[in-house]
Image (tube, grey):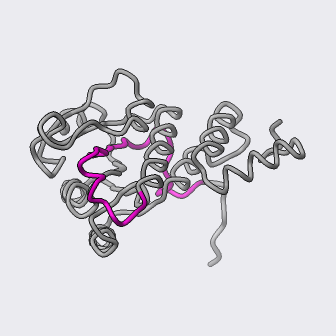
Amino acid sequence: MSITATTTPGKTLLSPTDHALVLIDFQSQMAFATKSIAPELLRNNAALISRAAAGFEVPTILTTVAEKSFSGPMFAEVTDAFPGQRLLDRTSMNTWEDAAVIEEVNRIGKDRIVFAGLWTSVCIVGPTLSALDQGFEVYVITDACGDVSAEAHERAVERMVQAGARPVTSVQYLLELQRDWARADTYELTTGIAKKWGGAYGIGITYAKAMFGASEGGHG
């Protein structure tokens, strides 16, 4: 018996309304020891996903650990995207063990959670495995995470994937939220974010627009 294809998107694809984003410990002290990704690329990717989430109105939780006493402020690349939003400061390394964070997760009420932050093997593994155990679907934006070594980051990602988490990347996250260039309401938002934080892809968009007036999906 043959299968009939339809235009229905896959159930595991992310959309702006089906998940909450949790950004964890993008802080100075955590970044100092991060060696698995260059700091400028980490900051860039943190900015990209923050602007994507803010622009698409994805409910987002910002959480820090020992902000005043040890770890320092959260990256401005993140907080600038969410002006005035309260940072939930924790003592626990595992975000999922913090009552204020869990209260916010329950208030938002999404069964699908996307995580990014520092460090992958501690502050991302902890909540990922905990959320999976409780029946949540979990995605991890792996190039917006970092660790003390490439080995630590890679083994952490491997461990989370083995447990059922789905890895994605920063540009992938942005484009999955847009998904169709015919969605004119968010076209300029998406291409604008890509131009500024999308690396070579963003340069390509700028070039095509400047040289030929071109645009993806035929938008001018």
Relative side of 24 to 169, left or right: left
Quadrant of the rendered image containing residue 215: top right
Relative side of 18 to 61, left or right: right
Which residue extends farthest front?
Answer: 32
For the residue pair 91 and 33, the one nearer the viewer reads as 33
Residue 86 pos. (x, y %): 27, 26
Check the picture and name the quadrant holding the C terminus.
Answer: top right
Relative side of 179 to 119, left or right: right
Whether residue 25 is in magenta: the answer is yes
Magenta range is: 9-38
Tell me the chief SS of the magenta region.
loop
Check the picture and name the quadrant holding the N terminus.
Answer: bottom right
Which residue extends farthest top?
Answer: 84
Residue at 36% across, 36% down: 60
Work out whether 204 lies above or below 89. Answer: below
Residue 126 pos. (x, y %): 19, 57
Quadrant of the rendered image containing residue 89: top left
Residue 184 pos. (x, y %): 71, 34
Residue at 30% across, 70% down: 149
Quadrant of the rendered image containing residue 160: bottom left
Relative side of 87 to 8, left or right: left
Residue at 63% across, 40% down: 190
Whether residue 109 is in magenta: the answer is no
For the residue pair 191 and 146, the one nearer the viewer reads as 146
